[in-house]
Amino acid sequence: MEFTAKANFIRVSPQKARLVLDLIKGQRVEDALNTLLFTKKGIAPAIHKLVRSAMENANYLSSDKGLDIDLDRLYVKNAIANDGPRMKRIRPAPMGRAFRYQRRISHIEVVLAEKPGFQGAATTVDGEEHAPVKAKGKKAPVKKTAAKKAPAKKKIAAKKTAAKK
């Protein structure tokens, strides 16, 4: 199950937003929020708010809709910043001229997902912890390596010594 949150028309260039989004991709939600909290980029608070929103979407579905979701196992599956419309602006230039520049806008999307598998080791009725048991199956085939030939340098050295005599 995936949970998304989108923020459109954010006044930051997508390149700057991607710098921060790359920091949190693949991290657990708690670690991502801590990373965003201590990141010094200007877009970090907006992305922090977006990750919290996606987490609250998951919380809503788990509590109100009755889905079985473990919020501790959520991680940032995908985080992208796409280009939005550009605002064209004009800056005054010397001798009455004007230079055009563009203010970039981004659309940011964060996708959270639940990690598959269990967090801890398997426990039995007695409370003893055991390592997970590997399933018995076919063994992987062993690759055969080719026999190495003798180095060519020794043959050349033997010919040179024979030529000198």
Image (cartoon, rainbow, N blue to C red):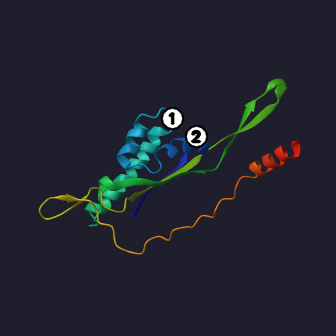
- Residue at image location 58% in from the left, 47% down from the top: 106
Give residue 155's position: percent from left, percent from top.
Answer: 78, 51
- Residue at image location 27% in from the left, 60% down from the top: 131
In this view, the residue in front, 107 or 98, is 107
Furthest toward the front, the residue is 165
Mark 2: which amino acid? Lys
| 23 to the left or right of 103 | left
In 3D space, how far apart are the residues under numbered discs 1 and 2 (Cα atoms)? 9 Å
In this view, the residue in front, 123 or 153, is 153
Q: Name the residue under label 2.
A: 16
- Residue at image location 36% in from the left, 57% down from the top: 57
The answer to whether residue 8 is above or below residue 146 is: above
Give residue 113's position: percent from left, percent from top.
Answer: 40, 59
The answer to whether residue 143 is above or below residue 6 is: below
Mark 1: which amino acid? Gly
**Could one spot residue 134 in this view of the protein?**
yes
Label 1: element kind: loop
Q: Mark 1 points at which residue?
A: 42
